[in-house]
Amino acid sequence: MRAVVQRVKRGKVTVDGQVVSEIGPGLVALVGIRQGDGERVCRYLAEKLVNLRIFEDEKGKFNYSVKDVGGEILVVSNFTVYGDTRKGRRPSFTEAAPPEAAREVFERFLDILKEQEVSVKSGIFQATMEVEIINDGPVTVIVES
């Protein structure tokens, strides 16, 4: 699994003109599932997201996690996170898991993340989504398992 994680002031997912998820301060994670990902990888990434210290303390140092600051997490499935652009001009997505396998892993990941005592919302798997992100900082990191 790979996640592009942004610290945000707010985030929102819209599908067909309807808001399906919205958060205030917290994290937006664009998550890609790789072929072969499973339970162990889901647990690792969930623990990492919840405890990733990218929120500033009173001295401006990254010492707080989303859990520490009472923030929310908006998770958006995004197979293009596994786009390989090293050859040619069109990304290759051969590392990304096929949709049905990815859906199962993504849903399990959400379940595990929700066990972490933090508010979790998500987009709709395989939908064409408009993702609105108001990045805070900007702070953007890539987390991989």
Image (cartoon, rainbow, N blue to C red):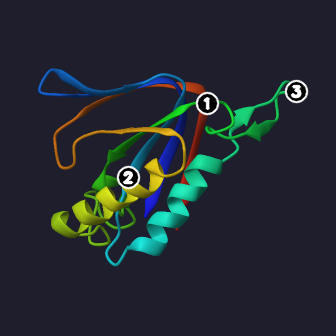
Q: Which residue lies furthest to the right in this view?
A: 59
**Pick the front one: 44 or 32:** 44
10 Å neighbourhood of mark 1: few (<14), some, or many (≥20)?
Answer: few
Q: Report which residue position mark 2 lands on.
A: 110
Q: Where's residue 28, x and y in %?
A: 46, 37
Q: Percent x, y for residue 11?
A: 41, 26
Mark number displayed over residue 59: 3
- What residue do we see at 36% from left, 64% from top? 84
Looking at the image, tell me whether mark 3 or mark 2 is earlier in sequence order. 3
Q: Disc 1 designates what residue? A: 70
Where disc 2 sits, the SS reads helix
Judge left or right: residue 129 versus residue 56. left
Q: Do the residues bearing badges 1 and 2 touch, measured as CB atoms within 8 Å? A: no
Q: State how far apart marks 1 and 2 are (Cα).
A: 18 Å
> Is residue 62 shown to the viewer in this render?
yes
Q: In this view, does 137 lie above or below 43?
A: above
- Up-down: is 32 above or below 15? below
Q: Is residue 31 left or right of residue 135?
A: left
Q: Which of marks 1 and 3 is nearer the N terminus?
A: 3
Which residue reaches farthest bottom?
A: 36
Discs 1, 3 touching: Cβ within 8 Å: no
| Amino acid found under the numbered disc labelled 3 | Lys
Q: Distance between the residues labelled 1 and 3?
A: 19 Å
Q: Nearer the viewer, mark 1 or mark 3?
A: 1
Amino acid beneath label 2: Leu
Instruction: Give the structural element (helix, strand or loop) at label 1.
Output: loop
Relative to 51, 73 lies left or right: left
Quadrant location of residue 35? bottom left
Tell me the amino acid under the disc marked 1: Gly
Q: Is residue 60 above or below residue 46?
A: above
